[in-house]
Amino acid sequence: MAAPSEGALRRSLAERQAAADAQAEAVRALKAGGGASKADVDAAVEALKALKVEAGAAARRLQQALGAGAGGAAREELRQAVVNTLERKLFYIPSFKIYRGVAGLYDYGPPGCRVKANVLSFWRQHFVLEENMLEVDCPCVTPEVVLKASGHVEKFTDLMVKDEKTGTCYRADHLLKDFCKEKLEKDLALPKEKADEFKRILAILDDFSAEELGAKIKEYGIVAPDTKNPLSDPYPFNLMFQTSIGPTGLSVGYMRPETAQGIFVNFKDLYYYNGQKLPFAAAQIGQAFRNEISPRQGLLRVREFTLAEIEHFVDPEDKSHPKFVDVADLEFLMFPRELQLSGESAKLMKLGEAVSKGTVNNETLGYFIGRVYLFLTCLGIDKGRLRFRQHLPNEMAHYAADCWDAEIECSYGWIECVGIADRSAYDLKAHTEKSGVPLVAHEKFSKPREVEKLVIVPSKKDLGLAFKGNQKMVLEALEAMSEKEAFEMKAELETKGETNFKVCTLGKYVVITKKMNQEFDAAAKVIAKALTTAGISHIIDTTAISIGRRYARTDEIGVPFAVTVDSATNVTIRERDSKEQIRVDINEVASVVKQLTEGQSTWADVSAKYPAHVGPQGDQE
Amino acid sequence: MAAPSEGALRRSLAERQAAADAQAEAVRALKAGGGASKADVDAAVEALKALKVEAGAAARRLQQALGAGAGGAAREELRQAVVNTLERKLFYIPSFKIYRGVAGLYDYGPPGCRVKANVLSFWRQHFVLEENMLEVDCPCVTPEVVLKASGHVEKFTDLMVKDEKTGTCYRADHLLKDFCKEKLEKDLALPKEKADEFKRILAILDDFSAEELGAKIKEYGIVAPDTKNPLSDPYPFNLMFQTSIGPTGLSVGYMRPETAQGIFVNFKDLYYYNGQKLPFAAAQIGQAFRNEISPRQGLLRVREFTLAEIEHFVDPEDKSHPKFVDVADLEFLMFPRELQLSGESAKLMKLGEAVSKGTVNNETLGYFIGRVYLFLTCLGIDKGRLRFRQHLPNEMAHYAADCWDAEIECSYGWIECVGIADRSAYDLKAHTEKSGVPLVAHEKFSKPREVEKLVIVPSKKDLGLAFKGNQKMVLEALEAMSEKEAFEMKAELETKGETNFKVCTLGKYVVITKKMNQEFDAAAKVIAKALTTAGISHIIDTTAISIGRRYARTDEIGVPFAVTVDSATNVTIRERDSKEQIRVDINEVASVVKQLTEGQSTWADVSAKYPAHVGPQGDQE
């Protein structure tokens, strides 16, 4: 049997309370009249007692239901125990404690630092390395023009009220929220209609204007919680810490409230860095600052924190994701808009179905939801206390077109931990307008990508079988092709399976088949996966230029080891400084490179162990 | 033959120039007089030409000498080539470039981020892990009271002058420095006395008061470099970015100019965390902010940067360091005060000799100089371009009692990269005074440390040989000893080599020898070293409590694996979650733990491979 609803319990309590009140009135009347017999009075008093017991029981049932729903005392106790341990063991410390601290600022002590470092290191491994993201590191101090363009100067505000006598500041929505919650949890005599009203307010609170909030605060007679003084009308307070850059005092700056803007203003450079191809992602880990009006809930709402952000730039007309299949079968708690609006709970859904049904808008958004799910559960988050909740239309940040939050249920209830927003091109457009620098990607560059993969990995075995002594010259001619020639060859291979190719040094045409150029993709992927697992950053370079020039390119930026896949079973590893190469089985590549980079073995060690290879040296550019 | 000094070259140039001037005057006189023969005039003109050639040659010699000394054009060219490559490859990017940037703020692009992450990761490994330092992570936003106590609000200033018409700001010392350098490098006619004066100014510039700087700027007629407008008198400008914490606008805050204050204000908690023992070190990596008046020299003088700091707290009466022997034989360029004051160059010195002669004040300071030398040379810094320069007394920061800078010679000259300062107890005293919370260490706790090491690592083998079936009970009794009893036992073992010990559960006294408790220190150190090399954070716990309670203690803070050294050849590894233990050869411990923590093998894998061990479970506390 289902438990009675909160409404039914409230009604039951109200009826029993009313009956008890009526009986109490009756007892008073009997006594006052003086004509009633003692037996009549006694019977009426007994009936009153029974009604009071019933009302008491109804109150307890309601209280129990409310207590279970809101978490109650057990939750509060658990939190206190955890907080005590964490503070005692210096996982975190209220900052500047000897000066009685500053609300919303916390230090991490030694074990907290370790946990934080482990989480960030896993984040880098899981997101940045796995997807070959471009990591950037921008300053916290940000000039006003950037945050005007992004909308933060105008819109990054919370509504604030002041104690009219002491000047103490409060977040207006928090006061109204606390009032409604307190009433719902503790006022057992609350009529059902009033309870419903408070619940509706809690659901739509985030959407209230300053005027609406002010009106409700007045209507309910809400006062300053500490002093019971009257409150000012709500007005917006910008959450950014303001400062002044340079010595003149004329240049306004802010401490960044998010790290993403540093990525957006660099879009053009990053796009070029990525070979002018979409999609690509950039990532940043760094401090963010929000001058919260009245920080609370411990580490959950603080004035300075480390943020790890990813901006994934995708062709707006093709939001498919090649790796979506890897996460499509994941099943977890999802809480789309419709369920929230109809008052239902989150339910288990398969990610693949959520995307195919349109609940999640597209594969790319879905892919990142899946990756975040894997990240959080790998960190140890209980699957039963993790849900992905879609923002209601009115609730989203000023830049978002769609947004899903990963929420974790903790002692404070369901708390947002990760936001996955489709910001559309809001930021790039805003900065383009403000700076006059066009932050756009050109579609024509997005297609040739696949072609390059084909042409630059010639299959030496097949070429060898086909061309024998001439293999070297065919190979050189293939590597010397222009991008345009490569694209043309790709098109012909795709349609016909083979193509005629003129090798000038041989003075004749040869037949190139599709098979010759393709078979090492798989080997490269095996190696890439092993390197990712080993935590080694790498890029598969499949551009249509010679091996030698590719070596020169990576030599310039200091990449210590280059792996060339010219066989499906064993490959070459080249050391930058000596330009020497060795041949290594593909299954050993990752461990050899890891040992070298971690200093467990030297290049001399491995070149003694593995056979040398003579190939392009990488001198030419 | 030694090259002529700059002074000799200046004298030679001045003499030849004077001779040429005199001859020119003579020619003019001959021509004006009208009585001289054409042959006389021609001869005088020829002599003038010869003198001019000589003067020109002298000027070239001087210019060459100055060019080589100051770096010259080749250096400038090299720098430009390196900068171009670094910017083109996005190692770094001027921040907010699309908005024409902000002086002194730079982004790191993808390869720059990798380099930075590698350097920081090596720093953690080399310093924090190697020395078991306590890492903390404090906010950048800092309330005024902290920085008033530390002296930064009053003293963290540079002297500034303003263009009197445009208001553009300049660092006063930089203008004077540039003026003197320019004169020395480019004014070939500069008399030797004047050159000596400018050199003296360059040497003592850092010590000038506002009045002295202002007087020199007036005396030399230095004007604003961009406009040639007159300059204001110098006045102090505080380099901290100021902001306001919280919504009232009443609480002044600053962005921290160094991370060290976050460590000092936590001294008390960290000291307790370290078992109230000195010495210990705390470390912090994080952003620091300095609102430079006019940033220049690319990444060398910026307004926001990542700082990695260590504060090592040591008994002021015993600054010896047990690991100093490990670095005493290092030999590198040192530049103590005396050499600087006598105008000599840095010279190769052995660190051990520098400490024993008192050039470096004490072993602890020397140890860190040695560790910094190893860190920088491991990173690839050229030993010939690295020197340790001692600060002159007048040059040190307001908090420092002695200071050595690691300086690297780059295209800008010798640049400070690491500062190693003996801050004495300046900061702890200042915060004690301001906060009223005593930040002190008590000497009585610094001695018992060694005792604990003895008592809590009983040698099971020796105990087993001696006590056979009773070993377990002896062991339990040893572990159950109070600290006081342990200290008493230690004293007796030290003097007599053995002691009588009452085991209640056996109802008798047994003889404990010194050997039984000591031999595993070496094994623990071997394991610790291997773990450090593998990059695994660990602490050797030698406190005088039972193994079970020690497990409970590490379980509480989430340490996943505990190694108990109860044999010199093989030890136990215990997993926190299952409480299971396995026996592993000491040489395999680090690699087993590394594989487990990196997810290459699971606990199930290793427990299938290694024999199980039954011992204290760690339930009891």
Image: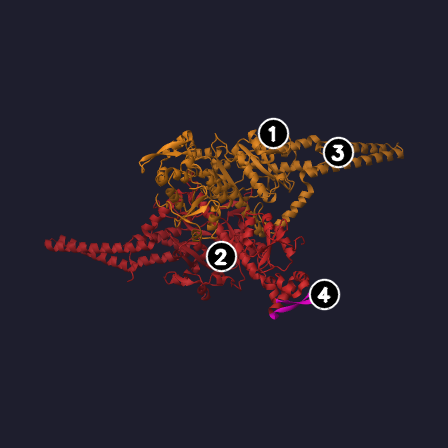
Chain colours: A red, B orange
Residue B13, label in figure: 3
Q: Are marks 2 and 1 on the same chain?
A: no
Residue A399, label in figure: 2
Residues at discs 4 and 1 in contact (Cβ within 8 Å): no
Q: Are marks 3 and 4 on the same chain?
A: no
Q: Where are the magenta residues, as a range?
A: A495-513
Residue B338, label in figure: 1
Task: Select label 4 or label 1 by which is in front.
Answer: 4
Q: Which circle's residue, 4 or 2, is located before the other in the chain? A: 2
Mark 3–mark 1 distance (CA, rounded to whole Å): 32 Å
Q: Label 2 amino acid?
A: Tyr
Mark 4–mark 1 distance (CA, rounded to whole Å): 75 Å
Residues at discs 2 and 1 in contact (Cβ within 8 Å): no
Location of the N terminus of chain B by quadrant is: top right
In the image, residue A369 sits, relative to residue A85, either above or below, namely below
Task: Select label 3 or label 4 by which is in front.
Answer: 4
Task: Select label 3 or label 1 by which is in front.
Answer: 1
Tally of numbered discs: 4
Residue named by callout 4: A507
Q: Label 1 amino acid?
A: Glu
Q: Are marks 4 and 2 on the same chain?
A: yes
